[in-house]
């Protein structure tokens, strides 16, 4: 565990330290896209944050290769090299897209090629565990198609959820934390060496996200861009593929006994495929709702709008930071709830806790819909947002007739009146300025 934590810390430190210079480089090269109608931020923000994240990945792999307990991963498996090859390709395409806005079909082709590069070097799904049946070996074409589909789906899911400051990096970090615990349990608890690469990939991915988040939290100083979102999506998919397609389910001895017992025992094997879906669940729901909404209005399903889930959270009254924290909460509930259920699938306490937390999440989600108002005797001690609003009196006619009269504004420490003790007038022409 210490070696994994050291790798995580080095990756986070390198990513954090390089993000500042990368931001200056992005500004100098003009990688600051114009604000679009659907964007939430109000000022042009540089992208290319994926450059720092990629070098963090390289640093993490380099450190792990020189650690005594982790260098065996590089000696016994070609998966780290396969991951680095695919990551380098998808990162390069992402950098070009952040700068030149590539076509969507070009990016899709690059995603498929990156997945193919990893498959060619051995990072692929070889078999699938099916409860009641056992381990089903896949043909080369079946494994390749399934691997490419999972990689492309995960990359686009992470890219799709990247709509608020710190949202994508935080959600990936949460899901990866749950995945790391699962993979480490297989590697250390069951002594399955084939789970070591996935555990290493998860630790490095957590470090990349943690190192980038301080620069990306609201208000964000830099965006990860497609160079970052596609990169972390590929690493997340590669971790799931590594442990699902390479770990032999028979080593866990789960397909023994009755069909019911085998079904419950097979849950830990399916968790690697389920955990990436914790990232996909929210954006895929948003995608389906967007298609239905735009089609209902007679628009193209690909027309951009401000009706996504994070836009809705802002519209109902949540602040930017609170909207991100709410989506963090739901991601953590899905990821760690799934992980806990895989460990103790027969415990009803887990189901009860998840249900209670879901109810709390719904209350937090709908909180702005309620308008609590404190009684008048307590208005002096509560924040202004909980006080009763006083009715604004309508302007009288004589005030409108005397609109050109000078109305002195008392000097004070606010706005432009903080520079002197003289009063400022709303009508500069009457105050003596030349007409």
Image: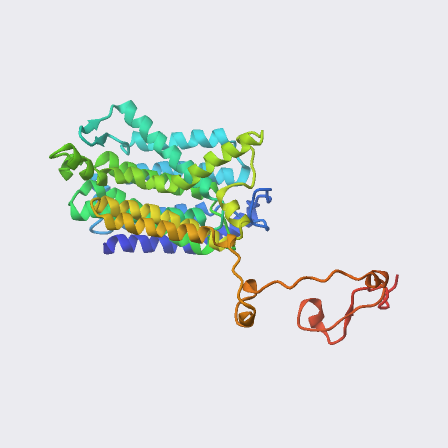
Residue 281 shows up from this direction = yes
Q: Position of residue 366 (x, y in %)?
A: 47, 51
Q: Position of residue 217 (x, y in %)?
A: 47, 54
Residue drawn at (28%, 55%), measured in percent from left and top? 5
Position of residue 364 in the picture relative to residue 200 (left or right): right
Q: Position of residue 127 (x, y in %)?
A: 23, 30
The answer to which image quadrant residue 285 occupies is top left
Residue 220 shows up from this direction = no
Position of residue 268 in the picture relative to residue 119 (left or right): left
Closer to the camera in the image, 335 or 252: 335
Looking at the image, residue 213 lies above or below residue 150: below
Quadrant into which the N terminus falls: bottom left
Quadrant into which the C terminus falls: bottom right
Looking at the image, residue 93 lies above or below residue 331: above
Closer to the camera in the image, 218 or 207: 218
Residue drawn at (37%, 56%), measured in percent from left and top? 13
Residue drawn at (80%, 62%), measured in percent from left and top? 396
Position of residue 34 in the picture relative to residue 67 (left or right): right
| Residue that sits furthest to the right in the current view | 435
Position of residue 94 in the picture relative to residue 29 (left or right): left
Residue drawn at (24%, 54%), measured in percent from left and top? 3
Q: Position of residue 114 (x, y in %)?
A: 38, 33
- Please, which colouring scheme is shown? rainbow
């Amino acid at each position: 565990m210490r070696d994994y934590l050291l790798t995580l810390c080095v990756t986070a430190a390198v990513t954090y330290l390089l993000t500042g210079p990368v931001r200056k480089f992005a500004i100098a090269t003009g990688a600051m896209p114009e604000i679009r109608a659907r964007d939430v931020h109000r000022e042009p923000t540089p992208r290319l944050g994926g450059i720092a994240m990629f070098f963090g990945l390289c640093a993490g792999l380099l450190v792990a290769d020189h650690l005594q307990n982790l260098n065996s991963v590089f000696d016994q498996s070609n998966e780290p090299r396969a991951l680095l090859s695919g990551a380098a390709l998808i990162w390069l395409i992402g950098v070009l897209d952040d700068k030149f806005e590539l076509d969507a079909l070009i990016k899709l082709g690059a995603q498929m090629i990156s997945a193919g590069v990893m498959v060619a070097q051995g990072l692929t799904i070889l078999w699938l565990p099916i409860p009641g049946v056992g381990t089903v070996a896949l043909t080369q074409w079946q494994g390749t198609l399934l691997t490419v589909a999972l990689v492309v789906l995960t990359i686009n899911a992470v890219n799709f959820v990247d709509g608020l400051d710190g949202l994508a990096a935080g959600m990936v970090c949460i899901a990866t934390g749950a995945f790391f615990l699962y993979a480490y349990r297989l590697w250390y608890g069951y002594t399955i060496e084939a789970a070591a690469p996935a555990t290493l990939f998860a630790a490095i991915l957590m470090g990349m996200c943690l190192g980038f988040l301080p620069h990306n939290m609201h208000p964000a100083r830099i965006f990860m861009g497609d160079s970052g979102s596609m990169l972390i999506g590929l690493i997340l998919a590669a971790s799931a593929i590594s442990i699902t397609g390479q770990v032999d389910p028979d080593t866990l001895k789960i397909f023994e006994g009755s069909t019911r017992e085998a079904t419950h025992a097979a849950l830990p094997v399916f968790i690697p495929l389920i955990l990436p879906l914790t990232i996909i669940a929210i954006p895929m729901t948003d995608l389906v709702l967007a298609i239905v909404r735009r089609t209902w209005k007679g628009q193209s399903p690909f027309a951009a709008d401000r009706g996504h889930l994070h836009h809705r959270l802002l519209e109902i009254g949540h602040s930017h930071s609170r909207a991100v924290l709410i989506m963090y909460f739901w991601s953590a509930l899905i990821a760690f709830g799934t992980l806990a259920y895989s460990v103790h699938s027969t415990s009803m306490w887990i189901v009860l806790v998840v249900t209670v937390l879901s109810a709390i999440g719904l209350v937090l989600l709908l909180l702005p819909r309620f308008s609590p108002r404190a009684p008048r005797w307590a208005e002096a001690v509560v924040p202004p947002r909980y006080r009763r609003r006083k009715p604004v009196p309508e302007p009288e006619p004589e005030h409108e007739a005397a609109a050109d009269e000078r109305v002195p504004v008392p000097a004070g420490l606010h706005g432009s009146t903080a520079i002197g003790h003289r009063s400022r007038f709303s009508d500069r022409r009457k105050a003596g300025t030349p007409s």
